[in-house]
Every structure is written in C-alpha cells, then in structure tokens.
Image (cartoon, helix red, strand yellow):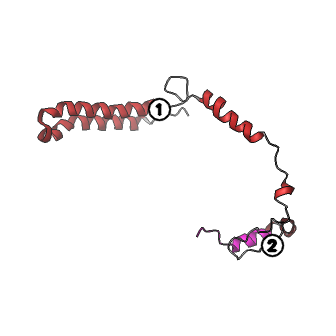
Amino acid sequence: MTTPMPFSYSVHIWSVTTLYVALLPFQLWDSLKYLAIPATGIAAFIFYGFIVAGEEIENPFGYARNHLNLDHFTEHIIKPELNALTALPMPDIGVWAFDPENTHVFCGDGRGEPNVTPESWMERGENAMREVLARVDHRKR
C-alpha cells in the first residue's frame, strides 16, 4: 500500500485546521479572556498532532519505528496458526458429508425436504438442489 493521501485532501485539511486555529482565540475571548491564548496553543497542538499522526500512519508498511512489525506478525502469529491448521490431516468427506445421519439438508424451515440422504441429493443433481433452495426461506427470524 504505497498510495499517498491525495494532495488536495491534505492541503484542504491543513488549510481548514489553520483557519480554525487562527480564528479560535476570537471565539474563546468572551469566556476565557487571556486564557484564550494558552487554550488556543493547546488546541493547535492537539489538532495539528492529529494531522501529523494521520500522515504518519498513511503508509504503515516499512521498517521505521512507527511501522507495523510484519516480521513479528508472520513469525509469531500467522506461522503458528498455519501450523495448527495443517497439523491434522484433512477430514475424509465420506465420513461427515455422506454420513447416513446427515439427512437434514435444506429443511431448516419445514418447507425443504427432510430425511433425504446426501447420496440421494447427488443422484438428483444440481437442478433439484436449486429448486429446493428456491423454496426454502433463508431469512433469519
């Protein structure tokens, strides 16, 4: 991800923030009097800090201190997860998909066809499955 923030967007954000911070003392004068000066300084620090932080995280992929540590993610998070997923052999589809007790395909709302074995669905073919799927109400209740 190397696409920078659009120049016009960046200029607009800086311009609007500068205008706001420049006019902020006039907005605060009635209520804060001379405290409007440090209050404006604090507000400027906060607003410009958000802009600079946004520009800093614009491209999080790299090797600088503030970038994501993808090497750590790969070695300590993704690699162990992949090892755990591939540690067991793939299940045999005949054991779970074509089990004789697996007869509740497409019958969640009562309009499907209960007690039809997976082998029977395979014999009926794709069109029969599509017809039953069209009848079944898949909306959550």
How far apart marks 2 and 1 lie (CA) works out to 56 Å
- In-front residue for pair 49/101: 101
Q: Nearer the viewer, residue 48 or 97?
A: 97
Q: Quadrant of the N terminus?
A: top right
Measured as percent of width and height from the top left, residue 59 is found at: 51, 31
* Snapshot quadrant of residue 43: top left
Q: Mark 2 highlights which residue?
A: 115
Quadrant of the rendered structure where residue 62 is?
A: top right
| Residue 89 position within the rendered picture, expressed as x and y whole percent measured from the top left | 82, 43
The residue depicted at 35 percent of the width and 31 percent of the height is: 49
Magenta span: 127-141
Q: Position of residue 3 (x, y in %)?
A: 52, 34
Q: What residue is shown at x 13% (from left), y 41% (from top)?
A: 31
Horizontal arrangement in the rendering, residue 75 relative to residue 6 (left or right):
right
Secondary element type, mark 1: loop
Quarter of the image where one finds residue 128: bottom right
Residue tagged 1: 57
Label 1 Cα neighbours within 10 Å, binned few <14 / some 14-19 / many ≥20: few
